[in-house]
Image (tube, rainbow, N blue to C red):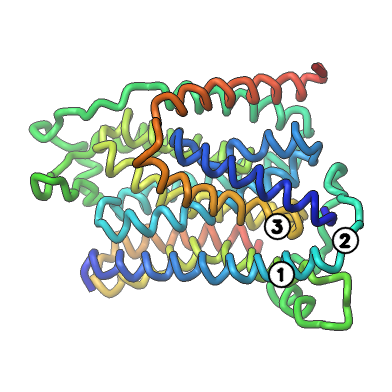
């Protein structure tokens, strides 16, 4: 990619992807790739490479804030990163042999699943009385996090199923060049029953580490075009930053509904594109 | 070193790293685009990037070889690689932090994650 006008329009689109992503709680990465493919006709492999770099940028920024607040649990994050990084290496290797069309279809399906997951209920679970999984205790995973009422202790359940789900999240991350945050949240929130605040914070820490495990392979395969990665990652980074600011003042529920419909349509478009149907 | 100390050190490294690499990427992109006005974009067909982007040393050499006018992209690449190193440094610091705490279990777990990352970059 070379023409400045093209780069600027990509940066603007990436900014909106980052903004929308942070407003509805998806990563910018999962939105920017279909926009680059469908809107700009960019090869999906270049798009995935650029998106994955932007995922690392935003997750590093967001994770830093959570780490400082002491909400994310590094032990949970690191022990589960064993699964996500190994999965990501496998996924990235698979991505290098799969045809473009198959990638587009899998991407569309994963995007639809992401939307469905973000519609799921997130009501806090009463769980302070029950006991943690013995393995989780052995791994020293249960912790506490700051709440307005002081430090609150929490338990950690079903480590092995959560760990396996994290492997799946890692594979998707490497295969599609996404952060797969929604899948990480499922593993920690739904399966391991870790409090939602701790889950989202820890997931941000993990997303960057997971993405780093596949980006090296993308780099070696020539998926990272600097002239595309630059406007995409800068745009998404700025967009995500603005989104986090807007979150406090924007009518989030309405925006979320509108954007989720938009993202679903984009996902269907990706599937059609991959199947060779043109609209 | 306590968990809180490790975490706040990590947070600072992460934010600083993102800012520095963002500035390098922006600078490299601006300069690159300024020298490529009117050149049509070429991302529609996948051709893979040049081999010298494989190694960090190769990128740095390209970035600072001024007579190679067409390779301003290497400056952007240096910024990108700095950004990619961010999570790796994050894990390396965790290894060191757990080592300092004499938490051998987590020292080993984070070392394992670090090994996977290094493998993926260099294998």
Residue B80 located left or right of residue B109: right
Residue A25 lies, with reference to residue B109, above or below; the image says above
Residue at disc 2, secondary structure? loop
Q: Residues within 10 Å of mark 1 (few under 14, many from 20)?
A: many
Question: In x, y percent, where is residue A73?
Answer: 28, 51
Q: Quadrant of residue B85?
A: bottom right
Question: In x, y percent, where is residue B114?
Answer: 48, 62
Q: CA distance from mark 1 to mark 2?
A: 15 Å
* Nearer to the camera, B82 or A130: B82
Judging by the rendered image, the residue that carries numbered circle 3 is: A219
Residue B18 lies, with reference to residue A15, above or below; the image says below
Q: CA distance from mark 2 to mark 3?
A: 26 Å
Judging by the rendered image, the residue that carries numbered circle 1 is: B28
Residue at disc 1, secondary structure? helix
* Nearer to the camera, A51 or B111: A51
Residue A131 located left or right of residue A163: left
Residue A18 located left or right of residue A147: right
Q: Residue at x 57, y 36 (%)?
A: A172
């Amino acid at each position: 990619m070379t023409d400045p006008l093209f780069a600027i329009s990509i940066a603007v689109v990436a900014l909106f992807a980052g903004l929308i992503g942070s407003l509805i709680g998806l990563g910018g990465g999962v939105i920017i790739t279909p926009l680059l493919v469908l809107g700009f006709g960019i090869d999906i492999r270049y798009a995935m490479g650029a998106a994955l770099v932007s995922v690392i940028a935003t997750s590093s920024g967001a994770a830093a804030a959570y780490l400082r607040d002491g909400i994310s649990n590094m032990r949970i994050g690191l022990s589960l990163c064993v699964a996500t990084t190994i999965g990501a290496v496998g996924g990235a290797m698979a991505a290098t042999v799969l045809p473009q069309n198959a990638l587009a279809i899998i991407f569309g399906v994963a995007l639809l699943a992401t939307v469905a997951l973000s519609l799921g209920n997130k009501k806090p679970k009463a769980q302070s009385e029950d006991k943690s999984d013995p393995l989780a205790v052995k791994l020293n995973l249960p912790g506490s996090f700051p709440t307005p009422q002081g430090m609150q202790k929490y338990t950690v359940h079903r480590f092995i199923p959560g760990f396996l789900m994290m492997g799946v999240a890692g594979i998707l991350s490497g295969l599609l060049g996404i952060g797969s945050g929604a899948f990480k949240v499922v593993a920690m929130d739904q399966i391991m029953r870790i409090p939602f605040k701790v889950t989202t914070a820890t997931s941000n820490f993990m997303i960057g580490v997971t993405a780093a495990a596949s980006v090296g392979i993308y780099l070696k395969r020539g998926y990272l075009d600097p002239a595309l990665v630059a406007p995409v990652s800068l745009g998404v980074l700025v967009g995500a930053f603005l989104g986090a600011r807007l979150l406090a003042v924007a009518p989030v529920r309405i925006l979320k509904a509108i954007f989720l419909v938009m993202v679903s349509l984009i996902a269907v478009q990706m599937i059609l594109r991959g199947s060779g149907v043109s609209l | 070193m306590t968990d809180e100390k490790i975490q706040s050190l990590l947070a600072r490294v992460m934010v600083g790293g993102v800012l520095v690499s963002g500035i390098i990427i922006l600078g490299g992109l601006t300069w690159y685009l300024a020298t490529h006005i009117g050149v049509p974009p070429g991302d529609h067909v996948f051709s893979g990037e040049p081999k010298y982007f494989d190694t960090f040393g190769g990128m740095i050499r390209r970035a600072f070889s001024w007579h190679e006018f067409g390779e301003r992209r290497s400056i952007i690449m240096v910024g990108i690689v700095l950004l990619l190193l961010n999570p790796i440094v994050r894990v390396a610091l965790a290894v060191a932090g757990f080592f300092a705490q004499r938490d051998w279990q987590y020292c080993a777990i984070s070392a394992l994650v670090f090994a996977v990352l290094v493998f993926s970059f260099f294998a």
